[in-house]
Image: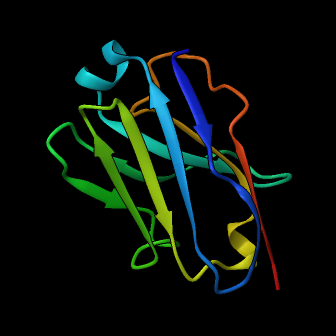
Amino acid sequence: VQLQASGGGFMQAGGSLRLSCVASATTFSTNIMAWYRQAPRKQREMVAVITTGGVTNYADSVKGRFTISRDNAKNTLYLQMRSLKPDDTAVYYCNTWPDVGLSWGQGTQVTVSS
């Protein structure tokens, strides 16, 4: 499995969730990794990105609320989401940044109610 995201669910506004993504060792060890999301009727957007060395960057819409991290020993990417808002409702995916053509997989659904 190249990329497999999990951890989504249904949450009320203000709540927290942690997403995980397991990647193949080859993919994870050499690539900048990112979380993306796609809300209904909207284009996919990058949410957070992390380099192999741990430098991070975030979309303005999630800055201060989401934290991306990676465990290089476990080939696992994380997204800690806090203070969730209804606008965070989307399917969340992990992938390399930039996209190098790997399958996006099914992602994991996050639904936030008001």
- Left or right of residue 7: residue 54: left
Q: Position of residue 100 (x, y in %)?
A: 44, 18
Q: Quadrant of the N terminus?
A: top right
Q: Residue at x 58, y 74 (%)?
A: 16
Q: Name the foreground residue: 68 vs 43.
A: 68
The count of marks equals: 0
Q: Residue at x 50, y 38 (%)?
A: 21
Q: Name the foreground residue: 11 vs 56.
A: 11
Looking at the image, residue 94 lies above or below residue 31: below
- Left or right of residue 51: residue 62: right
Q: Position of residue 62 (x, y in %)?
A: 49, 71
> Farthest residue in the left direction?
53
Q: Position of residue 95 (x, y in %)?
A: 49, 32
Q: Residue at x 24, y 21 (%)?
A: 30
Q: Name the foreground residue: 43 vs 113.
A: 113
> Farthest residue in the front direction?
74
Q: Name the foreground residue: 11 vs 36.
A: 11
Quarter of the view holding residue 75: top left
Looking at the image, residue 102 lies above or below residue 88: above
Q: What is the image's colouring?
A: rainbow
Q: Position of residue 29 (x, y in %)?
A: 25, 23
Quarter of the view holding residue 70: top left
Looking at the image, residue 63 lies above or below residue 107: below
Q: Quadrant of the C terminus?
A: bottom right
Q: Residue at x 19, y 49 (%)?
A: 54
- Left or right of residue 76: residue 85: right
